[in-house]
Amino acid sequence: MAKGQLKRLLSTIGTAIDGGARAQEAERRAELARLHIRDGRAIPQHIAIIMDGNGRWATKRHLPRSIGHKAGVDALRRTVELCDDYHVPMLTVYAFSTENWGRPPEEVDALMGLLWETIRSDLERLHQNGVKLRHIGRFEGLSPDIQRAIRHMEDLTKDNTALTLNVCFNYGGRAEIVDAVRAIVAAGIPAEQITEDLIERYLYTSGLPDPDLVIRTAGEMRLSNYLIWQVAYAEYYSTPTLWPDFGHDDFVAALDAFAQRKRRFGKTDAQIAAEHEAEQRAKVEPAEPPVAAPSASTPSQPQPAVKGAR
Ligand code: FPP
């Protein structure tokens, strides 16, 4: 066999072995994640994603950035299915930040149009699959058409329970805190009544659990003003994958990384171990029922008075 032919043959065999090894590794990671998932303690109950890299994905292909955003919607569709497959009940995505208004007008228009089109094309299917949709962000500044579409999607899906998909659109973490403070002041709430719980009730995310895991694609290591109050104790995971390429293996790798993190919420390892042991004991020996039922009256809590503070 000629030297050139042998080189080519070896290279083909090498690629096949590489591909096989990669597939095996992906399967191993998926199995690991499934094991953690069966264990039941390590599934993030709420994943928040910064979908970054649409522009780079398009540029690499000599395509307009808007095509990258379109491909980003496909990746989002896949991710919703993955959340369903892996029993992650809540997903929040960063689709348009308050800072994104500074992009070229044609890109802003493309992103606005994409939200509107996606609601139109996907809403019915998401609703049939029990997905509850919620907008997170400032309503003011969005066009009346988009505001109507958002109201309709929230209203139609409000009683769904299979999965919650929160779409951050015209969202900024600092703007959210500013809106909450304004609403608290407008409601005349005295300083001594201001607690973390109260502030949470005035955020756009009122009533939602905090994210357990933040995923950012395209290799960046920033939060970019995303859910800055809510992710105080979240685990952070960054992948070099560009958002339009994000798929099963990336998702499972993120779940796997999460499952291996030790979350201590400011406490010590020993305290966490003791709490876990107590939890396990309580599962085996359920507590005695209380002798007298506690009072049913709960003090009423102030509610947001300003519409923007949702
Ligand atoms: C960041 O990538 C991504 C965005 C600013 C928009 C994300 C939007 C989508 C995935 C689609 C719209 C979603 C819905 C729900 C309709 P980038 O453009 O900054 O990428 P780059 O850093 O590579 O330039």
Image: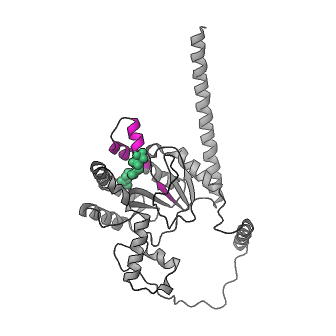
Q: What percent of the width, then of the height, locates residue 114?
A: 32, 51
Residues 289 and 180: in front is 180
Report the front residue among 192 and 271: 192
The residue positioned 43% from the left and 84% from the top of the image is 302
Front one among 40 and 303: 303
Please provide percent x and percent y for residue 76.
43, 51
Residue 125 location, x and y as percent?
37, 55
Q: Is residue 60 magenta?
A: yes
Main SS category, magenta section: helix
View extreme (left): residue: 144
Q: Is residue 159 visible?
A: no
The part of the chain drawn in magenta is 47-75
Q: Is residue 298 above or below residue 134?
A: below
Tell me what residue is drawn at x 38 percent, y 38 percent. 59
Give the answer, above or below, for where 134 lies relative to 20: below
Q: Say whether residue 270 is left or right of residue 304.
A: right
